[in-house]
Image (cartoon, rainbow, N blue to C red):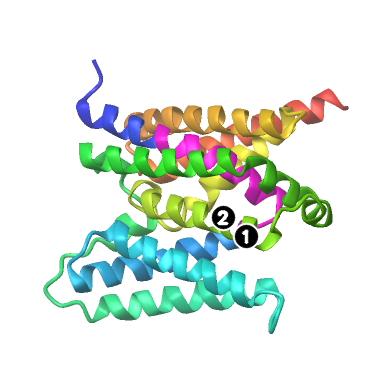
Amino acid sequence: MPDAFIVRAFLAGCGLALAAGPLGCFVVWRRMAYFGDAISHAALLGVAISLAFSIAPVSGVLLVALLSAYIIARYSGRLHSVDTVLGVVAHVSLACALVAMSFLKGVRLDLNSYLFGDILAVTNGDIILVWVGALATLGLLAWRWQALLTSTLNSDLAASRGFDVDREQMVLMICLALLVAVAIKLVGALLITAILIIPAATARIFSKTPEQMAFFAMLIGVASVGFGLWLSLRADTPSGPSIVVATGVFFMVASLFLRNRFS
């Protein structure tokens, strides 16, 4: 029988993978990879705020992630280009987080666990939190799926059908912020974007419809969690990076399959 901490890690990782799969598809379709980086870097500022005010880290992370998403949505394309706003938010928030953490005296801080995650240390409470966040994300995506998909494929068509494109973009950003808040302890701020993008990019190779791509991305994410945890135990490697390595392996295998198929 597997050890209890492995079971907890796998259950938490599966919850994250199931939510990250379809959400990552929208990130890939909209070419928002850098947006994920910006939100995950901003999450570290939320960690610093949580430690300073002795509140649950997920609360501070969610607050800062939502605020960052609002700033990006509010100012992108108006005064500055999207990539400029993303760069400012990502780097300024990360720098502020590191500066703020240097002022935290008497607080035991393992910065590596927030940068790279520590999925093997999750508790039963963490599992519940991850699954609540994952189900909330999936529920929101399912509710707004057609509107989000239409807005992603053709904003003019979405507007003609009565969909508010700006509102749908904000819904997507809220989902990303929520996922980052529950994922930072599992895979860390530096690896969250990889969990979003790589399974979705791999699923794109085999998929013929958006729904197929979302479903395959979920399966690949779950398989990556299992393979990454196995690799971590066998080779004594960090668990979060090992999961990302597993997603990379699946992506390379799928890419080779595609190359051979059309060669």
Name the one closer to the observer, 26 or 87. Answer: 26
Residue, far bottom: 79
Numbered label attached to residue 171: 2
Quarter of the image where one finds residue 96: bottom left
Q: Are marks 2 and 1 in contact (CB under 8 Å)?
A: yes
Residue 194, percent across and down?
A: 54, 48
- At label 2, the amino acid type is Val
* Residue range corresponding to the magenta coloring: 14-34
- At label 1, the amino acid type is Arg
Where 221 falls versus 64 (above or below)? above
In the picture, measured across the screen, residue 214 lies left or right of residue 30, that is: left
SS at badge 1: helix
Residue, far top: 1
Where 89 falls versus 196 (above or below)? below
Where 141 falls versus 70 (above or below)? above
User: What residue is shown with label 1?
Assistant: 167
